[in-house]
Image: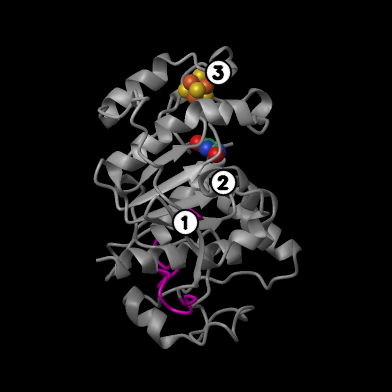
Amino acid sequence: MNDPFELFSRYLRQRQELGEAPWVFDTPAPGETVAAASRSRTPSRPDPAGAHNAGGDAGGEPGSRLPAAEPATTSQSRAPSPRGETDAGEARPKKVDWRRGAPPIPPQGIVVPPPAEDLFTADPLADKTLEEIAALVRECTRCRLCKQRTNAVPGEGPPDARLVVIGEGPGAVEDETGRPFVGRAGELLTEILAAIDLPRERVFICNIVKCRPPENRKPQPDEIEACVPYLYRQLEIIRPAVILAMGGTAAETLLNTRQPLAGLRNRVHQFRGIPVIVTYHPAALLRNPNWKKPTWDDVRIARQLLDARG
Ligand code: URA
Ligand code: SF4
């Protein structure tokens, strides 16, 4: 079930089941521009995060008020809304301004220094490029996860990406396609990134382990240990301004800790000199929508760090 519109309506239904007022989309009057319609209307629903977000709709999370398209300036040029309506008088969600109500940058957390130079054992990946790493991953048999994979999933994105997103490991659709985050969780991730004005194409997206664990079980410690050198070399090549670690496996591995995820949020950690923000995994958000708001806050912290780092 990969239809984003269906996903979106399901998410809205879930929110309503959780007691939220139904969402009402601004509908421009005939001849009125969308921008003018947005300005002239009062917020169309009670804002549950009102105290935190003076702007009324400022705390709107991706997936609740889908910021799928840039604001259109005329009713003619409007993009289809998530509900698929395209006729005159249709409804469409407003673009979320991620800056409004964003939390401040939190204090420093765990610092993982670069490894001490080892004069005796050369790192076999040290001179490899991103393409070479991907080729090695596709052929890799370093752990048992190679046995059941259809495709290894090295990760994808531009080599000069300023943000690297790290998940746990490929799921079924990723295993089929060889691409990271392309199933349901991936659709949500794409939406979250768009909401902080980062098109997915500008982000490097990858995982802790590059092959799918059977039945999507958690990767085991020896599998992680066998696989992370690929990730660490990818990070060394890309040297992003910020890393977003999504979920416990990514956070624990990068930061070398067993602390639960909740305690790792709201800190700027460092992995070998690169700031790390920890947040929930998008698959967890699909199961528990209560984590959407904290995740929205976390990614906005990551986004501010990107800005702060020029
Ligand atoms: N979950 C992950 O952690 N990674 C993916 O690539 C897809 C789902
Ligand atoms: Fe190799 Fe990583 Fe796949 Fe294991 S999970 S076989 S270490 S690429």
Residue labelled 3 has its Cβ within 8 Å of some atom of ligand 2: yes
Whether the magenta-drawn stretch holds residue 87 is answered as yes
Relative to 91, residue 122 above or below: above
Which residues lie in the magenta part?
Answer: 83-104
Residue at mark 3: 143
SS at badge 2: loop
Residue 124 lies, in percent from the top left, at 34, 23
Residue beneath disc 1: 192
Q: How crowded is mark 3: few (under 14 residues within 10 Å), some or many (20 or more)?
A: some
Q: Residue at x 43, y 70 (%)?
A: 96
Left or right of 122? Residue 257 is: right
Figure quadrant of the C terminus: bottom left
Q: Which amino acid does label 2 sit on?
A: Asn
Residue 176 in sight: no
Closer-to-camera residue (192/170):
170
- Circle 3 SS class: loop
Report crowding for label 1: few under 14, some 14 to 19, many 20 or more residues within 10 A (C-alpha).
many
Give the alpha-carbon distance from disc 1 to disc 2, as whole Å. 26 Å
Q: What element carries label 1?
A: helix
Q: Main secondary structure of the magenta part?
A: loop
